[in-house]
Image (spheres, rainbow, N blue to C red):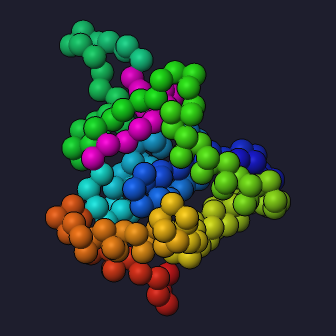
Amino acid sequence: MRYEGGKAFLFVAVDSTSKIVVARIYRKATKLVAAGFLKALVKTVPYKIHTVLTDNGVQFVQHDRRTERGFVDHIFGAVCAANDIEHRQTKPYHPWTNGQAERMVRTIKDATVKSFHYASLTDLRRHVRDWQIAYNYAKRLKALRFKTPYEAIRQLSEKKPEIFIRTPSHDMLGPNT
């Protein structure tokens, strides 16, 4: 994503069930940034993540780097293992395999950098954060029977409380957000 000062990288996670979106903008797209995004995702969502699907970028996948002791652990894979998350990769050169995330990236870009000029990275981050809040808490989706992603998570927490780490009602918007 471009802004007046240069280029930034958008990391996006979309929950396939509730359609909740977590988006963050970083200055670089490195292995450490990808691992940090996954850690932030784990802390953000109120339920346990069991699987992540990523492309085959170097940020997410180890490409046969060996040492005398064997394979070197990739930091993203280590974060997955530490949180008991299964890591799956899309088939190379098949971006439609990860269609929800690809479409969400396009939607975010249409709402931000394709419509507005940003003087700083802070302005771009602020607008993406505001868009994300509006989407998760106010956008009624046909796929969710015209509920918001937050309402879908709350409803799921009432039906299956055992999969939740914390009560989603604590994530409600209020005067301090």
Q: Where is residue 167 in the image (x, y as percent from the top left)?
A: 27, 75
Q: Position of residue 163 (x, y in %)?
A: 21, 61
In the rendered image, is residue 101 in sight?
yes
- Which region of the structure is painted magenta? 50-62
Residue 38 or residue 32, whichever sits in front: 38
Q: Does the magenta stretch include residue 144?
A: no
Total numbered circles: 0
Give the prevailing secondary structure in the magenta stretch.
loop
Q: Is residue 60 magenta?
A: yes
**Above or below 39: residue 85:** above
Q: Is residue 32 left or right of residue 87?
A: right
Q: Quadrant of residue 81?
A: top left
Q: In which quarter of the image is residue 113?
A: bottom right
Residue 21 or residue 176, whichever sits in front: 21
Residue occupying the far left of the picture: 162
Q: Where is residue 99 in the image (x, y as percent from the top left)?
A: 55, 40
Name the residue: 54% across, 45% down: 101
Q: Is residue 115 left or right of residue 173?
A: right
Name the residue: 37% across, 42% down: 52
Name the residue: 24% across, 13% down: 70
